[in-house]
């Protein structure tokens, strides 16, 4: 099967797709359990005032072929490429349709345009090769009437029965098999480190009016079980610019970068599965008896798979404070992420001295982070006490044995904090492979700079780079 895919698209795109982890989706795409939407078709629907329909009611032109999905992958000349797959997490605004008036579709179309322009430049108004995963359109729905004809909306099960309203069939038996397979793949789509996730967390302004037919479930986004799970999957390992809460958008953003700045705010750290399961008990499900244990298991599987094998975690500019740092280090320790992690980028948060203490404690744990090569804590409101916590950890035997780069720019470390670092780095065996330290904009003083540079010019460290200018 993989060989045939290679024939249908260029070698470089196929190889990049595999390298980025696209192989995870081959099974569910080749079986037909999930089909991905063509983003250009989706945007055209929004711009023409249309609405989306259940998968079985959509024309073939709505979907991308497997080879088309692979062909959208940026090749090696692109810096830090990602899979061109966008996953949509959203509330169903009605029991029979998630977006009957096209409100969310228009929001998505705008975000997709900004994403595309960010990647390919403004150019002609045509979307690049993006594929979209959205449950209504991509997996089989209960939309077949009593004659088996797919309709524009779904049918609901009768209370306490396996039958559907109006005598509808719902799904064919063969579609039910594929539907169950697709449910098992949801964690891969939303938690994959190289897919994008757009969360639609805000209801339309007219939601409480007669414009919508309300079901019993009118809970907000984060109070719904599946939405809570999808949003938790989306923050496990993705960089800051790949998980966006479009409910925070003002509608005035003129670039994807600005959209990221606005819509990555309030993002939470990874949630430990036990804590996730406790919180899940408070969430609403249409069918909680079956879905709640299924969701808990799917989340636990994705948590272990993603964090345990992650080599790079880029959680920049998320405004995480010391409590968020506590949650992060708990998740990393519980998942066994430390042994494989090579880069931890926390630039632009609000860890503060207490957050530094939490991280330092994690670094000191026996065998923790043996492969970590780069740590970025720039612009984290660290003071002298925070530097002292880190310095104490660096002196402990075996702490961060492979650390080569440490970034502490833009904090409030001052002379006292620099002195703690200087003392720690003098200790025998302290971070033995450190080659780069950045301490710009920390008001450490000229004399302290000279002393610190002298300490860092140790035998065997001829490649050392030290940026201390204020």
Image (tube, helix red, strand yellow):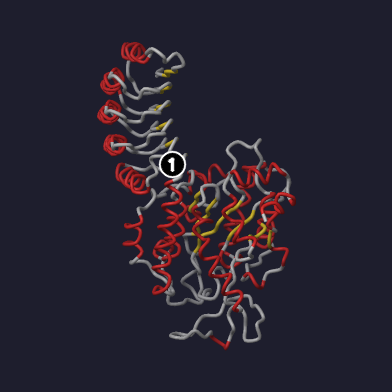
The residue sitting at the bottom extreme is 167
Residue at (43%, 19%) from the top-left corner?
Answer: 467
Residue at (36%, 15%) from the top-left corner?
Answer: 456
- Which residue lies under the disc numbered 1? 315
Q: Nearer the viewer, residue 241 or 79?
A: 79
Q: Nearer the viewer, residue 442 or 373?
A: 373
Q: Nearer the viewer, residue 310 or 150?
A: 310
Residue 413 in picture, x, y percent from top left: 31, 25
Is 134 left, or right, of 294 in this rendering? right
Residue at (67%, 49%) from the top-left corner?
Answer: 72
Which corner quadrant of the image does residue 403 belong to? top left
Instruction: Tell me: residue 337, above or below residue 77.
Output: below
Residue at (55%, 72%) from the top-left corner?
Answer: 97
Instruction: Tell me: residue 435, above or below residue 70.
Output: above
If the image is split into quadrants, where does the N terminus sit? bottom right
Which corner quadrant of the image does residue 37 belong to? bottom right
Instruction: Tell me: residue 237, above or below residue 470.
Output: below
Residue 6 in picture, x, y percent from top left: 71, 49
Residue 462 in view of the camera = yes
Q: Categorize mark 1 by other alpha carbons within 10 Å: few (<14), some (14-19), many (20+).
A: many
If the image is split into quadrants, where does the C terminus sit? top left
Of helix, strand and loop, which one carries label 1?
A: loop
Residue 195 in picture, x, y percent from top left: 55, 50
Residue 454 in picture, x, y percent from top left: 35, 11
Is 294 left, or right, of 142 in this rendering? left
């Amino acid at each position: 099967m993989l060989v045939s895919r290679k024939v249908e698209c260029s070698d470089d795109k196929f190889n990049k797709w595999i390298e980025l982890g696209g192989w995870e989706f081959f099974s569910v795409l080749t079986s037909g359990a999930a089909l991905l939407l063509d983003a250009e078709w989706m945007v055209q629907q929004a711009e023409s005032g249309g609405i989306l329909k259940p998968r079985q009611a959509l024309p073939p032109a709505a979907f991308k072929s497997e080879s088309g999905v692979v062909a959208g992958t940026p090749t090696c000349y692109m810096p830090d490429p990602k899979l061109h797959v966008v996953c949509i997490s959203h509330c169903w605004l009605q029991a029979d349709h998630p977006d009957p008036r096209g409100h969310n579709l228009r929001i998505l179309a705008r975000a997709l345009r900004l994403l595309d322009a960010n990647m390919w430049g403004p150019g002609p108004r045509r979307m690049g090769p993006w594929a979209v995963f959205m449950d209504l359109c991509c997996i089989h729905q209960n939309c077949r009437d009593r004659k088996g004809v797919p309709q524009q909306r779904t049918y609901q099960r009768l209370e306490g029965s396996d039958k559907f309203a109006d005598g509808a069939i719902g799904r064919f038996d063969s579609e039910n098999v594929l539907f169950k397979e697709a449910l098992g793949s949801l964690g891969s789509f939303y938690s994959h480190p190289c897919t994008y996730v757009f969360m639609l967390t805000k209801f339309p302004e007219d939601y409480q009016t007669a414009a919508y037919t309300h079901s019993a479930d009118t809970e907000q986004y984060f109070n719904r079980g599946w939405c809570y799970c999808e949003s938790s999957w989306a923050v496990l390992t993705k960089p800051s610019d790949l998980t966006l809460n479009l409910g925070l958008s003002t509608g005035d953003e003129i670039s994807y970068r600005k959209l990221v700045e606005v819509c990555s705010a309030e993002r939470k750290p990874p949630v430990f599965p036990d804590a996730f399961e406790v919180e899940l008990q408070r969430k609403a499900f249409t069918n909680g008896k079956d879905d709640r244990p299924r969701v808990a298991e799917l989340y636990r599987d994705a948590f272990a798979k993603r964090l345990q094998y992650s080599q790079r975690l880029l959680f920049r500019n998320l405004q995480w404070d010391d409590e968020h740092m506590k949650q992060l280090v708990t998740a990393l320790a519980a998942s066994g992420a430390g042994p494989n992690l090579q880069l931890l980028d926390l630039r632009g948060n609000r860890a503060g001295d207490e957050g530094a203490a939490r991280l330092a404690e994690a670094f000191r744990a026996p065998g923790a982070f043996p492969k970590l090569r780069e740590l970025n804590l720039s612009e984290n409101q660290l003071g002298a006490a925070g530097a002292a916590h880190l310095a104490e950890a660096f002196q402990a035997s075996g702490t961060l044995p492979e650390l080569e780069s440490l970034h502490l720019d833009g904090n409030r470390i001052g002379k006292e904090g620099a002195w703690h670092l200087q003392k720690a780095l003098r200790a025998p065996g302290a971070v033995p492979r450190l080659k780069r330290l950045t301490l710009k904009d920390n008001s450490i003083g000229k004399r302290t700079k000279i002393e610190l540079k002298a300490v860092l010019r140790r035998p065997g460290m001829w490649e050392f780079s030290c940026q201390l200018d204020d």
